[in-house]
Image (spheres, rainbow, N blue to C red):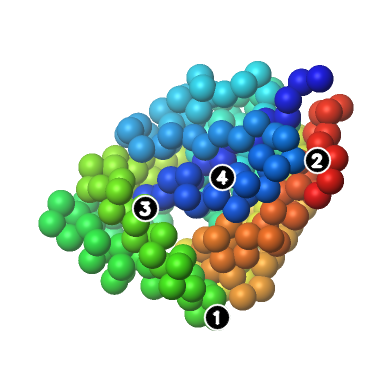
Amino acid sequence: MAEQSVIFVPGFMCDERLFRPQAAFFSALGWNVQVANTQCAHSIGDMARQLIRDAPDSFALCGLSMGGIVALEVMQQAPEKVEALALLNTTPLADQSAEQRIAHIGRVDEELMSIIQDELKPRYLSATNNDPEIVRCILAMARDLGPDTFKRQSEALLNRADMRCMLQQIDCPTLVLAGADDQVCTADLHRAMAGAIPGSRLVIVNNCGHLSTLESPETVNQALYSVFSRTGSNRPQGG
């Protein structure tokens, strides 16, 4: 029987650590788990093209924040490959933070960690869920990815297209999930996005901010499984 596959797409200045709880969950169920490399491309389109080149013939796709933007671009480029879709803490809108991004690009070579810790991190986590372990993970990912990745990903986000017009074309099982306390991509934005995607499932997670996979991993795992297990004829048992 064919192996069920899922590809996770990290957010801005994040890597596979963003999805460790989800990778462990799906691996234990026998799924083939991949995490897309978004570190080297200069555009959302190139990130999506690389993902598609490295992907199996069909797969479930989950993106968080910037990763959700990449996932929507994959749906533009190769929708026939995506069996199920999860859009977590993300947006279909064109960039709304151009001035801040340009300023950060100019400072990041000398001030990467202060930008992450003092300006970005405070908006990421719910005030009720500010776990020191999650904070350490955020800072470690940023430190390891470095200023060059920051600049490439900022450029990609700065120049991205508005994707709202394609939401109604999505025809695979789809999860739209937000943290109730997300300041970056609000719950209301996700309600509108879910309303535009036919048949999508909307989940709003209480006491959760922008990094739902780390803040509320069990809730996210179950929401993903509820949608991804609807795909294919070779569904894993359990969960």
Q: Earlier in the sequence, mark 3 or mark 2?
A: 3
How would you rate the neighbour count of disc 3 (Cα within 10 Å): few for under 14, some for 14-19, many for 20 or more?
some
Residue 169 seen in this snapshot = no
Mark count: 4
Q: Could you tell me which residue is drawn at 73 percent across and 29 percent down?
A: 4
Hey, which residue is sitting farthest bottom in the picture? 128
Q: In this view, does 18 lie to the left or right of 86?
A: left
Q: Nearer the viewer, mark 3 or mark 1?
A: 3
Q: Is mark 3 on a helix, strand or loop?
A: helix
Residue type indicated by callout 3: Met
| Residue linked to disc 1 | 128
Q: Which of marks 4 and 1 is nearer the N terminus?
A: 4
**Which mark, residue 63?**
4
Q: Distance between the residues labelled 3 and 4?
A: 17 Å
**Which mark, residue 141?**
3
Q: Nearer the viewer, mark 2 or mark 4?
A: 2
| Residue linked to disc 2 | 229
Above or below — where is 139 with respect to 165? Answer: below
Q: In which quarter of the image is residue 231?
A: top right
Residue type indicated by callout 2: Ser
Q: How far apart are marks 4 and 1 (CA)?
A: 24 Å
